Amino acid sequence: MKTFFMDLEFLCDEHDVYEDDIIAICILSEDDSYELLSFIHPEDDDYEVSDYCTDLTGISQNDLSDKPYFEDIYDQMLENIAQDDTIYVWGDTDLEAIYKASMQLADELEFNIVDFQTEFVEYCDYKFRPGLKKVYSALTDDDSAQHHDVRSDTLMLKEIYRIFHSDKKAAMRKVKSQLK
């Protein structure tokens, strides 16, 4: 059984995130043996990447035009991720999006997926869901990581997981002292 970390980016505008329109994916294995990093062409060929979305994610209309569709990326995932492997994401948006996209293609979830943010929140007994970058910055004292960059977010998640699982109590104390 292997552990993987994943982040997704979506079409968005100032008011909404379009969770059915995945435009980027990054999956990294815990042991650094596998990496999938790709832009994804939205299913609707009449898609439009808003200026807001480009400013937030760095992804432009031109970045997506000749990229594979999610179903092609999904096939690549399944070549490297087994049914007993676990993929960690940060937050229910990515969890629900990958679940829904997987179910549309396969009628079943062909891997385990866990919202690590929920696990973290429950362990720390928070009443709120702290953001990925805030937790990463609190644990590492690194404020320079680029948020909403699909690979950077995946690396932050992987590092949070590593730190948390090396010493849960110390990680909790460090985050709690900085996030209130």
Image (spheres, rainbow, N blue to C red):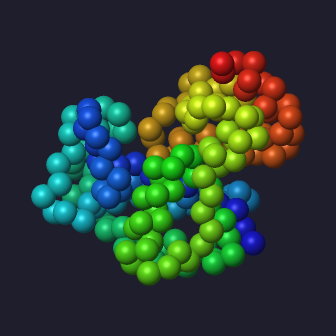
Is 52 rendered above or below residue 82? above
Residue 140: x and y in percent read 71, 28
* Residue pictured at 46% horizontal, 49% vertical: 93
Is 137 rendered above or below residue 153? above
Q: Quadrant of the N terminus?
A: bottom right
* Residue pictured at 62% horizontal, 68% vertical: 112
- Residue sticking out furthest to the front: 127
Taking the image as shown, residue 25 lies to the left or right of residue 160, namely left
Residue 47: x and y in percent read 17, 54
Of residues 22 and 18, the one drawn nearer to the viewer in this rendering: 18
* Residue pictured at 30% horizontal, 56% vertical: 21
Taking the image as shown, residue 120 lies to the left or right of residue 98, namely right
User: How many marks overall?
Assistant: 0
Taking the image as shown, residue 180 lies to the left or right of residue 42, namely right
Residue 85: x and y in percent read 68, 70
Q: Is residue 49 visible?
A: yes
Q: Would you identify the image quadrant in which residue 49 lies?
A: top left
Is 62 rendered above or below residue 65? above
Q: Quadrant of the C terminus?
A: top right
* Residue pictured at 63% horizontal, 31% vertical: 127
Taking the image as shown, residue 114 lies to the left or right of residue 98, namely right
Q: Is residue 26 visible?
A: no
Of residues 60 and 45, the one drawn nearer to the viewer in this rendering: 45
- Residue sticking out furthest to the left: 46
